[in-house]
Amino acid sequence: MERYLLDTLYWLWLQKGDEHHVDSKKFKEVEEWQKRGSVYVSAISVWEISYLVAAGTIHLDRSVEHWVESGTEDGGFQLLPLSTRVLIESSRLPDNPHGDPGDRLLMATAREYDLTIITRDKKILTYATKGHVKARKL
């Protein structure tokens, strides 16, 4: 069974119900993944969303704490920690894929847990074509 790691923006769009970025068929597909317990978010995404809220770049309908809690409750997205191994491996990714530390941590997390990253990030998708990480545009 394939398992998935949402990139930060994809998680944000899904949780906000943003049909401008995610069509209704994709919402249903992700709901099926949730029912199977096969969709994850990384702790780095919590940091990135918190940072974007603090910078005023995005706005949530509740506090970041409550937003994260509601997204990771039973039946929601499973939250993966930033383990020591993931932190170290993010600096050792083959072919030096990306300068963004958040994206490097997502890729290292996906590699560590054998997950497919769901993203629209062109650099991650290009890196996946080299076979170093699994990624899919949804």
Image: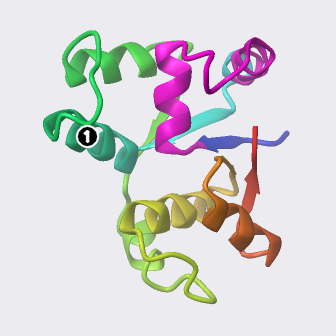
Horizontal and vertical percent position of residue 29: 79, 21
Which residue shows up at 33% across the image and 24% down it?
A: 68
Q: Nearer the viewer, residue 54 or 35?
A: 54
Crowding around mark 1 (Cα neighbors within 10 Å: few <14, some 14 to 19, many 20+) is: few
Residue 60 versus residue 50 in the image, above or below = above
State which quadrant residue 34 falls in: top right
Place of residue 60 in the rendered image (x, y in percent of width and height, measured from the top left): 29, 18
Amino acid beneath label 1: Leu
Percent x, y of residue 27? 70, 16
Depth check, front residue: 136 or 116: 136
**Residue on which disc 1 sits:** 52
Residue furthest toward the left?
Answer: 54
Tell me: residue 34, above or below residue 107: above
Rendered view: 126 above or below 121: below
Magenta stretch, overall SS: helix
Which secondary structure lies at badge 1? helix
Tell me the magenta residue range.
6-33
Q: Image quadrant for the C terminus? A: top right
Residue found at x 23% / y 24%: 64
Q: Name the residue at 66% across, 25% down.
A: 37
Residue 69 placement (x, y as % from top left): 33, 18
**Residue 32 falls in which quadrant of the image?**
top right
- State the quadrant of the N terminus: top right
Q: Is residue 37 depicted above or below 135 in this figure?
A: above
Residue 5 magenta-highlighted: no
